[in-house]
């Protein structure tokens, strides 16, 4: 009776090749997931989460789901630009955008060149953050009814504080 040996070259070669493919696939997945950093923004005053609607509106809502997740584009032209970030919706095809009229909405991403889609993080002393629009200098603001807009930045305005 012949006993199979683990040291047989063809068995070891096949196992090493299989492990190599698994490791390579894991590295590719890791690299792909590092392109985006998912996070949710919870308003300090209302406890509601920043929400991306299906008709490209932005509001806040109670509870979390995929539409309260925002991804930071960190690769190519969406990388961190002068400490400003581009935030995309859960489908990663539309970006958090604003205008001089203080409206906040989703628009197709502008390759990091649209300053209305760039948001600077301002760290507050209470551990929260405010998001300041690069083009307007205004901060992301909200109210108890769930409306989202931009307004003059104020460290004491809890509606502009997010966690």
Image (cartoon, rainbow, N blue to C red):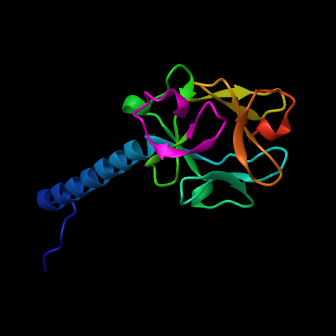
Q: Farthest residue in the top direction?
A: 82
Query: Does residue 120 show up magenta in the picture?
Result: no
Is 21 situated left or right of 121 in this image? left
Q: Quadrant of residue 139?
A: top right
Is 144 situated left or right of 11 in this image? right
Q: What residue lies at 54% left-to-right and 60% top-to-bottom?
A: 54
User: Quarter holding the N terminus?
Assistant: bottom left
Is 67 situated left or right of 41 in this image? left
Segment tinted magenta in the rendering: 97-117
Q: What residue lies at 46% left-to-right and 54% top-to-bottom?
A: 91
Q: What residue lies at 80% left-to-right and 47% top-to-bottom?
A: 143
User: Quarter holding the C terminus?
Assistant: top right
Q: Residue 22 placed where, x, y %? A: 30, 55
Q: Farthest residue in the right direction?
A: 156
Q: Residue 34 placed where, x, y %? A: 45, 41
* 122 versus 1 height, above or below: above
Q: Residue 50 placed where, x, y %? A: 67, 49
Front in this rendered view, residue 155 or 14: 155
Q: Residue 120 placed where, x, y %? A: 62, 27
């Amino acid at each position: 009776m012949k006993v199979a040996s683990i040291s047989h070259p063809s068995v070891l070669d096949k196992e090493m090749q299989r492990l190599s493919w698994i490791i390579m696939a894991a590295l590719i997945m890791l690299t792909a997931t590092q392109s985006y950093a998912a996070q949710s923004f919870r308003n300090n005053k209302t406890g509601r989460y920043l929400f991306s609607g299906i008709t490209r509106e932005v509001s806040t809502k109670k509870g979390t789901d995929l539409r309260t997740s925002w991804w930071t584009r960190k690769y190519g032209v969406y990388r961190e630009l002068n400490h400003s970030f581009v935030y995309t919706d859960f489908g990663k095809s539309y970006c958090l955008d604003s205008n001089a009229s203080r409206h906040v909405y989703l628009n197709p991403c502008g390759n990091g060149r649209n300053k209305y889609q760039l948001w600077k993080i301002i760290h507050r002393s209470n551990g929260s953050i405010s998001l300041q629009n690069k083009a307007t200098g205004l901060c992301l603001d909200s109210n108890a009814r769930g409306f989202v807009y931009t307004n003059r930045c104020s460290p004491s305005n809890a509606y502009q504080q997010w966690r």
